[in-house]
Image (cartoon, rainbow, N blue to C red):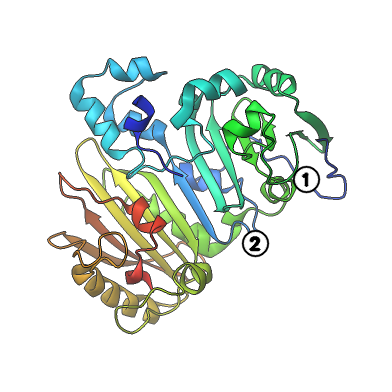
Amino acid sequence: MLKRWMMVIALVFVLGMVGLGSPTQALQGQGGALEQMLGQVPDNAVSRTLIWYGSAGDLERILGVQFNNLQDFQKLPPQQQAAYSLDLGNQVYTSSFSGLDNWANWQKTFAIDPFAIDRELTVGTKPNWYAILSGKFAADTITQALQQLGYKTAQVGQATVYSLGGDNTVDQNSVAAKLSGGQYNRLVVTDSVIVAAPSTAMIQAATSGKALVSDAAYAALVRVLEGANTVPNTQLLSAALFNGQFLTDRLLNNVPAPGQPLPRYQTAGLGFRRDANNRYWVIALVYANANDANQAQAELTQRLAGYASLTWQPGRKLFEGWKLTPKVTPAANGGLQVVTVSMQLPAQTDMSWIELVLDRDLGFLK
């Protein structure tokens, strides 16, 4: 699903019975970029699993670089190329929905420029997933390209949905379907947001319902992950958000806990923050009360200090020598408590929090 940046170098369907709202309104409200994007994610069974967030655009801004294509990137000084390449895909999430690993064909086929994607969310787990891509897009040009590719439209409420083929299928006679692997079977397109899904059910899940961020446990999680005081003078560039029950009972069901299980948390997150020179991981767990939070803080900190990889590099002490900064922060509302442990990355490391999630090497959260 993920590609390192250097790899970049080398049917009309009926939705009339569903209350389809518009997912394409401009980002509104207070809060950071992640919280604002989460305001576009409906609260349902799909979103209460795993949500990935990444901002290649914020990475560019932090590093003081800007480019619109591969040629621009190759003109950067080697040090800036290395810094960007080190983080994109390893620390800053990019999805297969973005087309970045096949940017030239993506732009030629869909008229969607992967370099125009500033931030993205992937909601759910394959095949029950969808993406929200935020940036600056030429919607008229894109929709013309989609119609030429054989996409059909259905107007439902404020949203025009573009549809190609069946649910979760890849039409081998369709260039578009083969290129996207069926992930672009359903699309909603505006100048600022693109919603992509492989099926009718997933485009419905993406476009109707109360916002997930209205849940106090999710709001508390994202506000701490991207809060100014979590790691001062840094910015959140990427994160994974978990429903607590999904993480412990499904994703980590067969992963042994290194000791007594942690008190049950409502939501959990892993995040990547940085400034121009320093990089940090942040682990966050949301609890209903201070007793559980304080117990979890002590146990989690101890676990991390001696944690040996289970699957990624079995037996390796992943955080040996890392400085851990734990704390418990009361949420702004709801009486919730948020446990955080921040860790500064060594200047030279092969560690990728994204790979740990993909490999389910998260026994310290069990």
Look at label 1 and name its amino acid: Leu
Residue 231 in the image: state x and y as whole percent.
27, 51
Look at label 2 and name its amino acid: Ala
Residue 288 versus residue 284 in the image, above or below: below
| Picture quadrant of residue 24 | top right
Relative placement, left or right, of 250 versus 67 is right
Q: Is residue 338 visible?
A: yes
Q: Nearer the viewer, residue 36 or 304?
A: 304
Relative placement, left or right, of 90 versus 286 is left
Query: Label 2 vs label 1: CA separation?
Result: 16 Å
| Mark 2 or 1, closer to the camera | 2
Q: Which residue is mark 1?
A: 20
Residue 200 versus residue 317 in the image, above or below: above
Q: Secondary structure at mark 2?
A: loop
Relative placement, left or right, of 133 versus 286 is right
Residue 344 versus residue 134 in the image, above or below: below
Q: Residue at x 73, y 48 (%)?
A: 204
Relative placement, left or right, of 233 versus 104 is left
Image quadrant for the C terminus? Answer: bottom left
Q: Which residue is mark 2?
A: 45
Q: Residues within 10 Å of mark 1 (few under 14, many from 20)?
A: some
Residue 50 in the image: state x and y as whole percent.
51, 57
Q: Residue at x 27, y 30 (%)?
A: 63
Q: Are marks 2 and 1 in contact (CB under 8 Å)?
A: no
Q: Residue at x 46, y 74 (%)?
A: 253
Q: Is residue 26 visible?
A: no
